[in-house]
Amino acid sequence: MSPGLARHNVLLAFGVVLMVLLMAALATGLQSEAALAKCEPNRSPASGTYFDGWKRVPGQNVYGAAARIFNYSPWVYPGSVVTAFSMFNYGLDRWAQVGWVEFPYDSRWTYAQWKDSSGTTQTHYYPPQPLNSYSYYTVVYNQSLGKFYFYIAGSLVDTANASFAPNAARVSGETHNLKDQMPGGYNYKEDFFDSQLFYGGWWQPLDGTKINYSDAYYGWERISSTYLRIWDKACAN
């Protein structure tokens, strides 16, 4: 291992430890919002993949992506799925992500998902975080060990063999039918606090570019270089 790579791995390990400690501290001190009602958007069903979030491609390898995400409960069209997550990726067909997910009829989970070396999508599910609370969702790439690490609320929940070297990060909401509710409403928006990526030896603000399927359907509001809010324009809550 070269001295430069060794120094990078030490900095990455130190940065991950600091991030995990901060997650644990913040997770115990946040106040929950009042329970929010689901909203069925007044739109016709249309299967697809719809995003609302932000991304960054810094021009070099990305070793971590993280955000403190509001654990929202959207309305989900039967047969569909809605999620909010932190992710890093390489192109459109290789990714590793961690977040919350909701299926129809209030079936809520957290999860880690990645593409393995065969190109198969692997998804592991875990118990949900408390509804209407905030949790850190973090994914880390260790180049020297060839591993992905997935953290939820400061706890390591899974590891996987790294099948690619990430070069981009994103934090986003995602639906799979236009009839789904994108997380958030115009009165109670989905929060992506403390959105960060790790590259160049440090955790840095994500400060990303817009990912939004349609401004007509979904709201997008940059509050700062680390804080993004999204919502479904058809819904108040």
Image: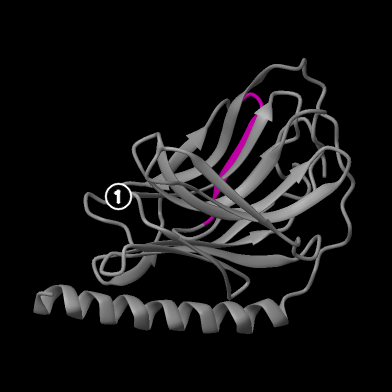
Q: Residues within 10 Å of mark 1 (few under 14, many from 20)?
A: some
Instruction: Give residue 220's position: percent from left, percent from top.
Output: 58, 41
Q: Which residue is mark 1?
A: 167
Q: Which residue in the rendered view is the most extreme toward the left?
A: 2
Residue at 74 percent across and 54 percent down: it is: 109
**Front residue of this view, candidates 61 and 191:** 61
Residue 91 picture quarter:
top left
Looking at the figure, which quarter contains the C terminus? top right
**Front residue of this view, candidates 27 and 125:** 125
Specify the principal SS of the magenta part: strand
**Left or right: where 203 falls relative to 71:** left
Instruction: Give residue 180's position: percent from left, percent from top.
Output: 75, 30
- Magenta span of residues: 216-223
Determine whether 64 is above or below 83 in the image: below
Whether residue 195 appears in this view of the structure is no
Looking at the figure, which quarter contains the N terminus? bottom left
Whether residue 51 appears in this view of the structure is yes
Determine whether 93 is above or below 20 in the image: above
Instruction: Give residue 141's position: percent from left, percent from top.
Output: 37, 63
Residue 131 picture quarter:
bottom right
Instruction: Give residue 94's position: percent from left, percent from top.
Output: 39, 41
